Image (cartoon, rainbow, N blue to C red):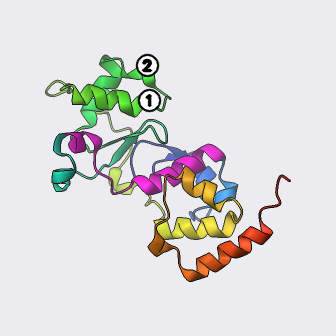
Amino acid sequence: MAKVSIGLRGWRFEEDEIFTDDEELKPLDEIPEDPRERLLRLVSLVEEPCDVCYLEHGDEEIRRCNEAEIVYGEPDGEVLLCPEHEPDLLYWFREAGGSDHKGSVEFADRFHEWVAAGNEAPEGYASVEHVEEDPDGLPDLPDQQEVQERLEEDFDGDRIDILELAGQERSDEELTEEELADSDLDLSTDYPSGR
Ligand SMILES: [Zn+2]
């Protein structure tokens, strides 16, 4: 089974867990829970800045931050990195105790503290051997619109939970009158589950 990264390098998915044989995104309710959670989280992470750049420049100078290309850690405790700052994460993980936090949602906080304390990888610290992966060959992440449509097709009753899972807050502009009407319908039809 092939593993693929999508959108950002780092998190890897079993290709056949998330794509159909035609390389279309599967309906979300056919995707196992863990990859689904990562997938939804990823959608909210693309186009975010690198964490280390952000710690350096802050909100005022956010334009100087590189867009993240790499994600490490667990959903909601993930670290986003640009290629320039990836060695810092690798050094912290391998040489400075970072691996103790593997699999924990504290992972990102501990790394951020380490960076904020002025630490970085030594000059010339090796970047990852980019495991037979061609960054330009990464499949694109399905866009927010497509995922949104999937959510509405597949998760009528669970819609809100899934959006929370993805760390998305529905803004007012996105909530059209039509959707409001739909959600009224959901109130009467989709809540009996579990009662
Ligand atoms: Zn950076």
Q: Name the residue under label 1.
A: 106
Amino acid residing under circle 2: Asp
At x 52%, y 53%, the residue is 166
Q: Pinpoint residue 42: horizontal percent, then vertical percent.
A: 46, 52
Mark 1 and mark 2 lie on one chain; the one further toward the N terminus is: 2
Q: Pinpoint residue 21: horizontal percent, then vertical percent.
A: 63, 61
Q: Residue 164 carries which label?
A: none
At x 30%, y 18%, the residue is 96
Which type of secondary structure does the marked residue at label 2 adopt?
A: helix
Sort mark 1 into few (<14), some (14-19) or many (20+) by Cα contacts within 10 Å. some
Residue positioned most to the left: 123
Q: Mark 2 points at which residue?
A: 100
For residue 92, above or below residue 83 = above
At x 30%, y 49%, the residue is 68
Q: How many marks?
A: 2
Amino acid residing under circle 1: Glu
Q: Give the range drawn in magenta.
A: 33-55
Q: Pinpoint residue 92: horizontal percent, then vertical percent.
A: 30, 24
At x 60%, y 77%, the residue is 179
Whether residue 57 appears in this view of the structure is yes
Whether residue 14 appears in this view of the structure is no
| SS majority, magenta | helix
Magenta stretch: includes residue 50 = yes
For residue 151, above or below residue 52 = below
Magenta stretch: includes residue 140 = no
Q: Pinpoint residue 103: horizontal percent, then vertical percent.
A: 50, 29
